[in-house]
Image (cartoon, rainbow, N blue to C red):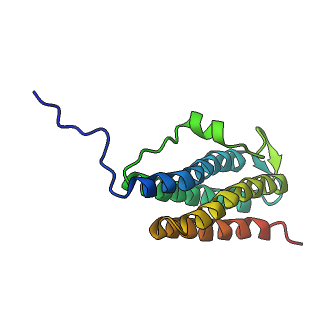
Amino acid sequence: MTDTNITTPALTADPEVAAATAQFLTPVVHKMQALVVNGKQAHWNVRGSNFIAIHELLDSVVEHAQEYADTAAERIVALGLPIDSRVSAIAEKTTTAVPAGFAQWRDEIRAIVSDIDAALVDLQAAIDGLDEVDLSSQDVAIEIKRGVDKDRWFLLAHLAE
C-alpha cells in the first residue's frame, strides 16, 4: 500500500520569496499570538472604575489579533512553508508587559499598548522588507498594521485626559 499523503507541500512560490516572506511574517504571527494570550490575561484580570469598557475592548483586541495571526500564518503556508506557533515557540520569541495577576485598567492598557508597540516594530520591518520581495505578502503586513494601529488608538483613547 502506497502512502499518498504529502506532508511537505511543494512550494507555490520561488523558494527565496517564500523564505523571505516567512522571515518577515513569522515574527508577526508570534507577536499576534502573544497578544491573543496576553490580551486575555489582561481581560480576565483588569480592575477599576472603567472595568467593563476595558474588559470588552480587550476581547475585541484579542479577536483581531487572532485574525491577524491567522492571516499572516496562512500567507506563509500558502507559499509552501510551515509555521511554528506552538505556545513554546511564542514564549521563546516574545515578551510581555502584562502582569500575572489583577491590575488597574490604566496599567493593563499601558501593558497591552506596550505589547502592540513591539508588534508594530515587526510589522513595519515586514512592510519595509517585503517591498522588494513579494507585494502580496507586503499587502498582508499593511492590512494587519492598519488594524493594529486602530486597536492601539482605541486603547489609548481611554488614557486621554
Tell which residue pokes out farthest to the left in this image.
1
Q: Position of residue 33 (x, y in %)?
A: 58, 48
Q: Position of residue 15 (x, y in %)?
A: 40, 53
Tell which residue pokes out farthest to the top in this image.
1
Q: Nearer the viewer, residue 34 or 121?
A: 121
Q: Position of residue 28 (x, y in %)?
A: 59, 54
Exactly how many numbered labels are in the figure? 0
Q: Quadrant of residue 129?
A: bottom right
**Quadrant into which the C terminus falls:** bottom right
Q: Quadrant of residue 7?
A: top left
Give the residue drawn at x 65%, y 57%: 122
Give the residue drawn at x 30%, y 46%: 9
Tell which residue pokes out farthest to the right in this image.
161
Q: Nearer the viewer, residue 149 or 81?
A: 81
**Quadrant into which the N terminus falls:** top left
Give the residue drawn at x 41%, y 47%: 81
Q: Is residue 139 above or below residue 118?
A: below
Give the residue drawn at x 64%, y 51%: 35
